[in-house]
Amino acid sequence: MSNVQKTVLVRATEAETLSASGVTLLADVPDTNGHLTSHRSIFQPGKEGAPPHLHREAAELFFVLKGSLRVLTGEDLVTLEQGDFLLVPPNTPHAFEAAGDEPAEVLFVLTQAKPRFGYYRLLEGAYRGDTDWAEVAKTSDLYDNHYTESSAWQGRDQGTWSR
């Protein structure tokens, strides 16, 4: 019996892309032997990326590939620029959206995560209008995605951003 684990390679041409939400699914927990889940997202200017939420078990890594991303982390509001890295620990409320006039492209990695590709497919249905948002809300424990309120996020247009 060997402890050798398989290498995970996902070719860009083989990755599943969810067009309504701008999410490209890269590798999920079952693919990575429980280590992580990862996806790439493109956020369009003027459209909300993700409302305030937290993960009770997972830490979430953000790496901005292109553009700028507005992020709530706890009660802090920051703008991430191309090449910036952010790690949001478990139980930390966070939210994000494109900043500026150009799309933001971001690589996400969640560690200690539950399988999440089902969640992104469910969101895709909600974005297209095929799935009721109440169905998404019912999956918070299944996917470790718990929506929360944030006065800092609600007031983000009036506040000042850290750069």
Image (cartoon, grey):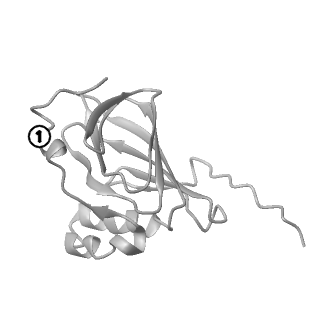
Q: Which residue is mark 1?
A: 155
Tell me the element at label 1: loop
> Residue 104, percent across and down?
35, 35
**The N terminus: image quadrant:** bottom right
Tell me what residue is drawn at x 23 percent, y 27 percent: 161
> Residue 109, percent across and down?
51, 49
Q: Nearer the viewer, residue 114 or 18?
A: 114
Tell me what residue is drawn at x 20 percent, y 74 percent: 134
Quarter of the rendering containing residue 72: top left
Q: Nearer the viewer, residue 101 or 71?
A: 71
**Residue furthest right in the image:** 1
Q: Is residue 43 above or below residue 114?
A: above
Tell me what residue is drawn at x 15 percent, y 37 percent: 156
Tell me what residue is drawn at x 24 percent, y 71 percent: 130
> Residue 132, percent across and down?
20, 73
**The C terminus: image quadrant:** top left
| Residue type at tag 1 | Gly
